[in-house]
């Protein structure tokens, strides 16, 4: 980190106005934005309510949200970095080397750890794990035996890869993924981050209403993660905006002996183009000339990191409560990216 660049009052005012605007436009019942600079403090901005059905309170930094695909970079990605440092994994070895032995062909397990992290593996993109319910083989083996959908190298967002990475982590450590992640979060001081299910209390933001069923509340939104009992490498984690900020500060800690910072810098090397101006690193999307790393969660969450300036912005909403989150939150996410890159 070459310079610490704190957010100005004008920055936070714009972010707060942007959050209020998307909520007023019906994007989400409410939400929280936390912006800060590593070592320089943070600002918590909130608007709306947690849910009209469960709590009319204004959400705050301690409100728990289903962070959906942020699980990839808040759980699986840092654990992969630790396993690499410990010599338990290798970026350019096939994943089958880190899974329980399998007989016969396993083409999807020939993908390397690097390919899975960068979404360039060629595995099947559509994920319907419920089709494997009742199968006589473990899930990792069923996925590993699937044929590739395309040649490796091109970018396509694939949840299956992170599901397999979660299985590999559990195998090489001989511990369940939720325990590995729990140890990491405890070490970082992320006391309100955990895999679900969680008790249905007013501090938990509910998500989607599904036909013929109660609104999801403390239960993971992602159906494939639910099929896996709520713990998966691609989804299943619940967290708060304050904990996401704590995590960002750990990653952006400028001390040279910070292993999280080393792994983040390594992960910000572009591996594949997503679209002009956006690349995929290891796990993260890279923007602004590969100086900003970010990731979204389908439910309405995001985390943005700018290592050069030490800035971060965390977004926590339950926008899927009101329908598809991506389009409705787009103006706020665009504003966040613009704000974090302003110098």
Image (spheres, grey):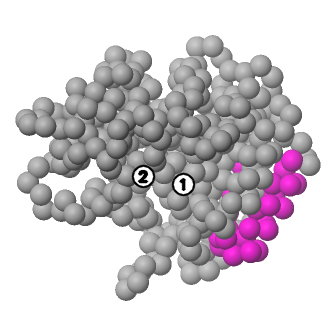
Report the magenta residues as a range. 11-34
The answer to whether 242 appears left or right of 172 in the picture is right
The answer to whether 183 appears left or right of 260 in the picture is left
| Callout 2 touching callout 1 (CB < 8 Å) | yes
| Element type where label 2 sits in the image | loop
Is the residue marked by circle 1 packed among few (<14), some (14-19), or many (20+) residues within 10 Å?
A: many
Name the one closer to the observer, 238 or 25.
25
- Tell me if residue 156 comes above or below residue 129 in the rendering: above
- The mark that comes first in sequence, 2 or 1, is 2
Query: Which residue is rendered at x = 38% and y = 23% of the image?
Result: 91
Q: Which mark is residue 329?
A: none
Tell me residue 193's x, y (percent). 50, 48
Q: Is residue 247 visible?
A: no
Tell me residue 299's x, y (percent). 54, 62
The answer to whether 73 appears left or right of 51 in the picture is left
Q: Disc 2 designates what residue? A: 235
| Element type where label 1 sits in the image | strand
Name which quarter of the figure residue 84 lies in.
top left
- Tell me if residue 57 comes above or below residue 3 in the rendering: below
The question of residue 150 being in magenta is answered with no
Q: Disc 1 designates what residue? A: 297
Query: Which residue is rendered at x = 13% and y = 37% of the image?
Result: 105
Q: Is residue 321 visible?
A: yes
Name which quarter of the figure residue 179 lies in.
top left
- Tell me if residue 236 comes above or below residue 257 in the rendering: below
Question: How far apart, in angstroms, are the residues tagged by discs 2 and 1?
Answer: 9 Å
């Amino acid at each position: 980190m070459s310079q610490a660049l704190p957010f100005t009052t004008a920055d936070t005012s714009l972010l707060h106005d942007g959050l209020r605007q998307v909520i007023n436009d019906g994007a989400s019942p409410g939400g929280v934005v936390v912006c800060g600079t590593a070592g320089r403090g943070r600002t918590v901005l909130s608007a709306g309510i947690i849910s009209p059905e469960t709590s009319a309170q204004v959400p705050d930094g301690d409100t728990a949200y289903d962070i959906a695909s942020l699980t990839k970079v808040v759980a699986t990605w840092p654990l992969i970095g630790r396993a690499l440092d410990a010599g338990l994994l290798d970026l350019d070895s096939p994943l089958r080397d880190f899974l329980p032995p399998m007989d016969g062909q396993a083409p999807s397990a020939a993908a390397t750890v690097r390919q899975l992290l960068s979404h360039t593996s060629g595995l099947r993109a559509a994920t319907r794990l419920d089709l494997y319910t009742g199968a006589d083989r473990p899930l990792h083996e069923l996925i590993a035996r699937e044929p590739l959908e395309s040649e490796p190298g091109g970018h396509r967002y694939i949840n299956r890869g992170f599901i397999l990475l979660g299985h590999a982590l559990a195998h090489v450590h001989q511990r369940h993924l939720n325990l590995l992640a729990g140890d990491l979060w405890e070490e970082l001081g992320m006391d309100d981050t955990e895999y679900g299910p969680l008790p249905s209390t007013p501090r938990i933001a509910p998500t989607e209403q599904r036909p013929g069923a109660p609104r999801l509340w403390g239960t993971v939104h992602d159906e494939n993660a639910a099929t896996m009992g709520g713990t998966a490498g691609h989804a299943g984690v619940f967290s708060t905006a304050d904990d996401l900020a704590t995590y960002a500060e750990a990653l952006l800690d400028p001390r040279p002996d910070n292993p999280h910072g080393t792994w983040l810098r390594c992960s910000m090397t572009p591996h594949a183009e997503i679209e002009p101006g956006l690349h995929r690193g290891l796990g993260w999307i890279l923007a602004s000339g590969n100086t900003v790393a970010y990731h979204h969660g389908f439910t309405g969450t995001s985390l943005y990191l700018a290592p050069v300036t030490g800035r971060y912005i965390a977004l926590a909403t339950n926008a899927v409560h009101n329908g598809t989150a991506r389009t409705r939150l787009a103006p706020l996410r665009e504003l966040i990216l613009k704000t974090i890159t302003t110098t």
